[in-house]
Amino acid sequence: MNFFRGVMGGQAAGPQPSGAETIQKLCDRVASSTLLEDRRDAVRALKSLSKKYRMEVGTQAMDHLINILQTDRSDSEILGYALDTLYNIICNDDEEEQDENAQKQADDLGVQFTDKFIEDPEHVTLLLTLLEEFDFHVRWPGVKLLTALLKNQGVQVQGIILVSPMGVSRLMDLLADSREVIRNDGLLLLQQLTKSNAAIQKIVAFENAFERLLDIITEEGSSDGGIVVEDCLLLLLNLLKNNSSNQNFFKEGSYIQRMKPWFEVGDDNSGWSAQKVTNLHLMLQLVRVMVSPVNSPGATASCQKSMYQCGLLQQLCTILMATGVPADILTETINTVSEVIRGSQVNQDYFASVNAPSNPPRPAIVVLLMSMVNERQPFVLRCAVLYCFQCFLYKNQKGQGEIVATLLPSTIDANSISAGQLLCGGLFSADSLSNWCAAVALAHALQDNLTQKEQLLRVQLATSLGKPPVSLLQQCTNILSQGSKVQTRVGLLMLLCTWISNCPIAVTHFLHNQENVPFLTAQISENLGEDERLVQGLCALLLGICIYYNDNSLENYTKEKLKQLIEKRIGKENFVEKLGFITKHELYSRAAQKPQPVFPSPEQMLFDHEFTKLVKELEGMITKAVHKSSEEEKKEEEVKKTLEQHDNIVTQYKELIREQDAQIQELKEQVSTMSSQNDQLQTTITQQLSQIQQHKDQYNILKLKLGKDNQSQANSQGDGSQVNGLQTEELTQLREEVEELRKQHTLLQTQLSDKEALISTLRSGASQTAEGSAGASDNTELLKELEALRSQIQAQSAEIHQMKTERQDLLRRAEAGSSDAVAGGDGSLDAAKMAELDSRLTAQMTETEKLKEEAKRSSETRAELEQQLASATSTVAILQTEKAKLQTEVQESKKEQDDLLMLLADQDQKIHSLKQRLKDLGETVDDEDDLDARDQTDDDDEEDDEDED
């Protein structure tokens, strides 16, 4: 321990060792010491020297420290010292203030030690395993060490963690740690882990990261929280930015709704802390990530819809119109609202209805435009307002019409300030930035909207007293010819190009002014400096649009004459070269990247994003149009006409096909409904036929039974009469029936006589008709009717004959009943038989019903038994699988026991050999048998002593 006293600062005699020598001795001590306390003290000493002698400790002790992590897992204290030491030699954050070269060397040193540590990926896996330890002295330095590794070599360490089993899940457990220090450092670790790695971002998101992070933000006080809220928001930005899968998961999980309370502000917004400003700024960025224009249109539209439905857009508009909000938060809020409403008709309509809390109330758009054209406002705020106005008009023809309508003479209100008045005021003000912003804003009101381009031609401006008003188009060209600042001219040229493109009427209005074309040719043909090249290119673009969209309505400025003018005054090659100045400008590519106007300074604010699209679309077409001859143009016009005709024909056919498709669809639906009805009717008919057949069968059976019963009654009539005797009531009833039958007979006799008379009249009429008109056309019809009547008569005569026979039978029965009283028992016998048959039939029916119920019960019982059998078979299968698992476990345990027995046998053999060698060397060795004998002897002696006592 004297050695450690010298290392730790104690005074020792003799020369003091250098730092490198001390570190070498400590490393040797760590490697060779068998006692845990010695190794722990040596690692503690290395930790104290690791900051001062970072290079020496890193080069000499890293392997020993890693070995400590692998071997001394049971001692948390030495693990903590080792992890702290590794963190000190790898981390670059704790360096003292140095010059740039020294700081760069320190950073390089940290990267070198990181490379050495991750040479073996198992070291990172070992570190992940140590993070599962709950001990604070192990988990906290482990988190810091892994964070330092990710900072120095993020991509390599991310790859190792990604392939490590449950690597990301172990790190996610840090957010659930109850100790805030570990949880907060875990947030920093996850920030480094999720940087620019979509795979890890997805895993972290599906490990329920959104839920945990939003809970932490709520617990810490949302926007009023501290640095922890900021760390959570930065991690959320890492997970969502440019990751469509996580964005969709965030939206589907209804996490957008949980963002609304973040933006609740009070009436008094003064005195916001810097941390609150930072938190709100990050929260607004998080909203923008979900609705960024670079996302897929479908995902953006879905998020915009959710933000409107949950009230988030309304909350943002409240911040927008609130007083006392810091300028940077207000700017970011404007940008956020811009992207939430961009391209969404519902959100744009809501934004148009928002009013500022002023007296009288003004639309929010008007208030924002007032800030945009006010040169005293901050530059970034004016850019944000312009972006908001552009997003409001993006794919919003209704909004474009409302803005243009405020400029028309019929809708101007002298008592209120409108958006059109503000744009015109900014367009012609002395501030070049206001000119440019107003021109671009007005161009967006005309973007892809032919109707508004034509409507804007009606706008008239009063320039001064006593002079007639001039059109807005003419005023723009007048300011161009006056030679104002480059920024103003660029803005006006962009407005004019957007205005007259794809609008032949506007081209005609522009060319109608005799001064415009000479001005453009003069601008293009001159050799000006670098600053004027962009203006020359835009003038060439404007002249090219006048050629391409010219309808040849003006004789002096037809397409051919304008091309001849270019060839004489400018030259085709020179014209195309000047046209290319636009796309070659350094600010053009920057503006083409994203819709938001972001410029480092007002002087560099020259290009608009939508205008770059227009230039890209028109440049090639204008170049071809300038180089084409008149014959080629005529051919092209003919081809266009034929194509238009073909298109019209195709359109007609398409409409016809659509109509036919609709008709076919209707017919298909009708066929399907009729086929279903037919199937239903067929099933109904089948059922009815089966029922009829059943009734017929039952009728035949009953008829047979009645026939047999009648025969048996006839055979045993005498015996029955003697047994039953004569009953007066039955005889009276039989006589009444005979009377009724007689009445029916007389009625039938009268009907028969009537029919015979009718037949005779018909025969006489038929004979007369046959004699009078033998060749008439209706003879055949009368003969057919006659034949039909004959068939009816024959049928009726047969029926009468049958009735006569029945009457005779009844009369015979009545006579027999009157002469012989015994015969009166017939009716009673028939009635008794019928009653007996009815009783049998009802009994059979009840018995059939009982059998049906029993069959139903048996089927239900059978179904229950089948279910029980299925459950029993599944239980048997489960038991069999469990039995197989148990058998495999038994086999494995047997194998392990055999291995242990083999190991014990080997150990006994080794012990026996070692004892033999000791005996050979002359050492006294007690055998196990001798020791057992001694123990037995000692036990016997103790028992004897106890007995004596």
Image (spheres, rainbow, N blue to C red):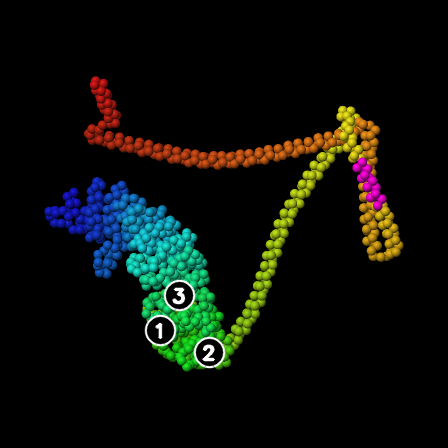
Distance between mark 2 and mark 1 Cα atoms: 26 Å
The answer to whether the residue labelled 2 contacts the one labelled 1, judged by CB atoms less than 8 Å apart, is: no
Q: Which residue is mark 1?
A: 432
Name which of mark 2 and mark 1 comes first in the sequence.
Answer: 1
Q: Position of residue 263 (x, y in %)?
A: 36, 57
Q: Identity of the amino acid at label 2?
A: Leu
For this view, does 867 lie left or right of residue 7? right
Q: Give the quarter of the figure containing the N terminus.
A: top left
Camera-near label (2 vs 1) is 1
The dominant secondary structure in magenta is helix
Q: Which residue is mark 2?
A: 511
Quick check: 270 above or below 513? above
Quick check: 703 above or below 391? above
Distance between mark 3 and mark 2 Cα atoms: 43 Å
Residue lying at the far left of the rendered structure: 13
Residue lying at the far top of the rendered structure: 948
In magenta, the rendered stretch is: 739-754
Helix, strand or loop at label 3? It is loop
Camera-near label (3 vs 2) is 3
Q: Residue at x 67, y 41 (%)?
A: 690
Q: Position of residue 946 (x, y in %)?
A: 22, 20
Q: Which residue is mark 3?
A: 361
The answer, for residue 387, to whether it is visible in the render is no
Magenta segment includes 696: no
The answer, for residue 948, to whether it is visible in the render is yes
